[in-house]
Image: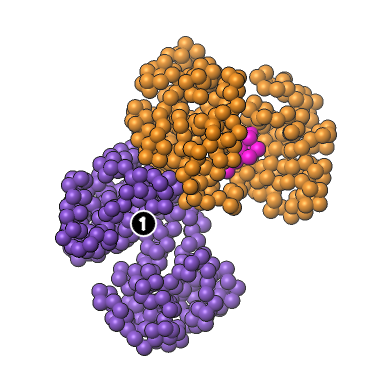
Chain colours: A purple, B orange
Amino acid sequence: MRIALLAHEKFPDSAKTAVGVLRYGDHEVVAVVDRENAGRRVSDFLDDVPDAPIVGSMSDVPDPVDRLVIGIAPIGGGFDESWRPDVRNAIERGCDVVSGLHYFLADDDEFASLAAEHGAELHDVRKPDPDLSVADGVADEVNAEVVLTVGTDCSVGKMTATLELVQAAEDAGYDAAFVPTGQTGIMIAGWGNPIDRVISDFTAGAVEEMILEVGDDHDVVFVEGQGSIVHPAYSAVTCGILHGSMADRLVLCHEAGRETVHGYDQVLPDLDEYVSLYESLAAPVHDTEIVAGMLNTQHVEGDDAAREAVESFADELDVPATDPIRFGADEVVDFVV
Amino acid sequence: MRIALLAHEKFPDSAKTAVGVLRYGDHEVVAVVDRENAGRRVSDFLDDVPDAPIVGSMSDVPDPVDRLVIGIAPIGGGFDESWRPDVRNAIERGCDVVSGLHYFLADDDEFASLAAEHGAELHDVRKPDPDLSVADGVADEVNAEVVLTVGTDCSVGKMTATLELVQAAEDAGYDAAFVPTGQTGIMIAGWGNPIDRVISDFTAGAVEEMILEVGDDHDVVFVEGQGSIVHPAYSAVTCGILHGSMADRLVLCHEAGRETVHGYDQVLPDLDEYVSLYESLAAPVHDTEIVAGMLNTQHVEGDDAAREAVESFADELDVPATDPIRFGADEVVDFVV
């Protein structure tokens, strides 16, 4: 599949999704659409992702192109009308469009009728699958090992840790799949259920459905976790993913220095309490254990201090640990798969 | 408030909601509408609820009447067209209509325009409040003590236990409130959020919002629990209610003889594991403990065997216990409030 990434005036620093698709996506990116940087190349900005030309509009993207991904999200999730000619051009060329905006492209009269006319699909990834239902408790029946990232809090780097584990597992020779559960992960993967948007009764079922979809075709399935099991607002989503995935192994993600729940006063429990809580809560549904730790050291100054933080984190958890961005997930992948 | 209960051809045995409103509702029931039993009285069938006449149609219900409650639910949750004249008559008299059907009365063109014309409100309790949001983690700031019923499984009697505790607390002189979280509880109370239908990210927030709404006006608030924390499909809802309610005390509900999850193969953990799981999972958000047990002995033959089962349940939990239907919730209410 050949992909174009829309990122007008935001590439690369404010285009998290576009950069994520470049870094972790399975498909070839044929162009980034950014009117501000037209004529330059991805490699002028980023040296650790596949290169691609930057063009000024969708009409400058050469054929063939199969999919246009909206790679930026304005505050509020609205649709920027200056993008309309790009989306229109894509649809008229029969190119599918994937969007994570709150504004649903499929509900836009012009886009919907153009898409019907030209046989293009509009994927609004924030819109949950209407066919979801309650879990049957059968995710453990797939052939793959199921690995779930869990966290001490939200925004500690679970999606990044999961994607880095997928790459490290593939580098080590495994056939690995990524099961996305949040909007950015879904945009990167090009499929998935936004678990935090489904009906609460279907939380576990929405995860199970994805694992059943890919689990028999891979050696290992890495499920992107959400929130934390002690989060005052989001723990329901975390619990549903924990039980719905019936994970064989857990990887605990944490950010160095995080002491309270992001945006709340609540103090985080000790790390060994997280281990005990995640394992004892999962066990009645499916036995599992935390086999590795992922420490986000983005706010730690220098590699030496970061290495020390990772070692102390590993000691507290009593499992191998790494910072997947700074030191690589390959340091722990053999303990995870 | 004066209420009429629609229960055509189902009263009382297949009219769970109608009987629940009679038994636990705060408002005066002026008539049951059941064309099959017209001319008889509620007391001909039930001796432990307030009496009321049974009439053949809504047009036979005397004024004043403030609310018609649909007290039966056909399989599938559809609207039975034979009820249309009753609902029409209610609306034309300016009487609000409360329904837990999947078919939304407010989306019925005739009912919607009649309701607008006559100033009647149509409450479809399966439709979640569109203004719900994520929890702020502040349910513990209300003046009332918050008591939550939790369970070893779904369908063990949490709603009944909660409603019996409300009555026992009121009999003991407390000003008690009931916070409903499921459809039948909402129909009985006439308000509430159907937690299992809200967006998963708002699970805790939807509970918190209800506690904030009533918590400062009462001594004690009893929150109806849902599911179980180890349920393979519904644990997300349970976890969201546990953390969103920030309950001061928990009451553990169980059905005597239940050994596996209802409808699943999964074996239930030991009772002491439930105590440990509920308390340790709640603690990082709000400290709480299980202070009483409620055992549903409906499938135990005879009061002596039931009393033995309750005593053994209390011993295992190491807290006082009762069967709220067979022996009354007043046996434990002093330990709960």
- What residue is disc 1 on? A155
Horizontal arrangement in the rendering, residue B325 relative to residue A23 (left or right): right
Magenta highlight range: B186-195
Parent chain of label 1: A
> Can you say whether A52 is above or below B113 in the image?
below
User: Is A152 or A173 nearer to us in this picture?
Assistant: A152
Horizontal arrangement in the rendering, residue B194 relative to residue B316 (left or right): right
**SS under mark 1:** loop
Where does the image place residue B235, in percent across and percent down from the top left? 42, 41
Where does the image place residue B68, in percent across and percent down from the top left? 73, 38
Kind of residue at badge 1: Ser
Q: Is residue A27 visible?
A: no
Residue at x-position 71% and y-position 46%: B122
Where does the image place residue B63, in percent across and percent down from the top left? 83, 34
Residue at x-position 21% and y-position 46%: A317
Residue at x-position 58% and y-position 52%: B131
Quarter the N terminus of chain B occupies: top right
Q: Is residue B208 visible?
A: yes
Residue at x-position 48% and y-position 55%: A197
User: Is B248 or B92 nearer to us in this picture?
Assistant: B248
Q: Quadrant of residue A63?
A: bottom left
Horizontal arrangement in the rendering, residue A322 relative to residue B321 (left or right): left
